Amino acid sequence: MKSRFLWVSAMVVTLSLLAQVSHAYKLEYDGSGHNLHWGARNFPVSYKVTSTPPVPLEAFRQIAAQSFGAWQEVTSASITFQSAGITHVKEPAFDGENSIITGEKVSGADVVGQSYIFYSTDDGRILDVDIVLNTSYPWSTDGSPGKMDVQNALTHEIGHLCGLDDLYGKEDSEKTMYGYIDFGEIKKRTLDPDDAAGLAAIYPVGLPEDSGGGGGGGCGTISPTSSPPHSGSVNFLWIFILMAILGARRLFLNTSGK
Ligand SMILES: [Ca+2]
Ligand SMILES: [Zn+2]
C-alpha cells in the first residue's frame, strides 16, 4: 500500500514539473517585472491602417477588422478595438496612434512582421503599438502558396499589441503566438485556447475600470488617442524610443522546411 502511494506521489510531481516547463502562453514584460498591458480606460483601443497596403485597401481594412475581431471575440477577456481609419505614416513612431503599416522597417530579412511597442516604464502600460508587415515578401488575402497571408500575420502581431509574447516550443506550433510563420499558412488566423487564455490573463472580464494601470481619475497620463507629449516631456520620448527597441516583437520566417 505504502509503495503505491509513493509511486502516485512521484507521478504527480513529474506531471507538475512538466507543466512548469511548457508554457501555455507568455506575457510581455518590461524590465521591472510589469506585464505590458493596455489600461481599461483606453478601450476600445483604436487603430489605423496604411493607405498603401500590399493588397487592395478595402480588403486590407476588412482583414484588419477580422484580425482584431479574433481577439475581441474571446469571451473570457474584456479588451475591445475600434478602427480609426487610414494613416499615411510610413515608419513606426510614438505619435499616439496605433498604426498597421507596411515597409522594410524590420530588424532582419527573415522578419515577416514586427510590432513596435511603446509603453510606460512606470507600470508597463502600453501607450502606442505600430505593426509593420515586411513588403519584401509577397502578400495575399487567401493563403495562396508562395505568399504570406495578411490575416495570418496580423492576428499574430495583434497578439503582441495586446501584450502576449512569442512561443517557440514544438508544442506551440499550432498557436497564433507561435513565433514562426510560413508561406501559404493560415492557422494563426484562429486562436488556440492557450492564446485566448493568455489574453484573459491580462484582461479578465469584470476588471474594474481603474485597474490594470489604466487609471480612472484622469491624472494626466498619456493615452494613445491623445496627442503625443510636447515640451516638458521630451525625456519621456527618449525613454520610449529606447524601450521600443527592447520591446520589438518579431515574426520569423519558418526555415525548418515544413
Ligand atoms: Ca504609433
Ligand atoms: Zn511574434
Image: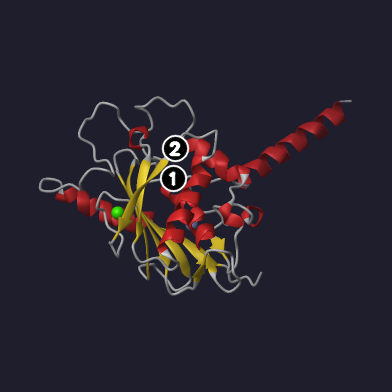
As drawn, is 128 to the left or to the right of 233?
right
Quadrant of the rendered image containing residue 44: top left
- Give the mark toward the camera: 1 or 2: 2
Q: Label 1: how many residues lie within 10 Å, few (<14), some (14-19) or many (20+)?
A: many
As drawn, is 68 to the left or to the right of 169?
left
For ligand 2, tell me if the residue under mark 2 lies within 8 Å. Answer: no
Q: Which of 212 and 141 is in front in this view?
A: 141
Q: Earlier in the sequence, mark 1 or mark 2?
A: 2
As drawn, is 38 to the left or to the right of 193?
left
Q: Is residue 151 above or below residue 27?
A: below
Question: Would you name the residue on which mark 1 appears?
Answer: 162
Quadrant of the rendered image containing residue 113: bottom left
Q: In this view, does 179 lie above or below 216?
A: below
Query: Residue 79's mark?
Result: 2
Q: Nearer the viewer, residue 195 or 15?
A: 195
As drawn, is 60 to the left or to the right of 117?
right
Which quadrant is the C terminus positioned in?
A: bottom right
- Where residue 172 sits: x, y (%)? 62, 53
> What kind of residue is marked 2?
Ile
Q: Which residue is drawn at 35% across and 66% down?
A: 52
Which quadrant is the N terminus positioned in?
A: top right
Residue 221 shows up from this direction: yes
Q: Which of 60 and 155 is in front in this view?
A: 60
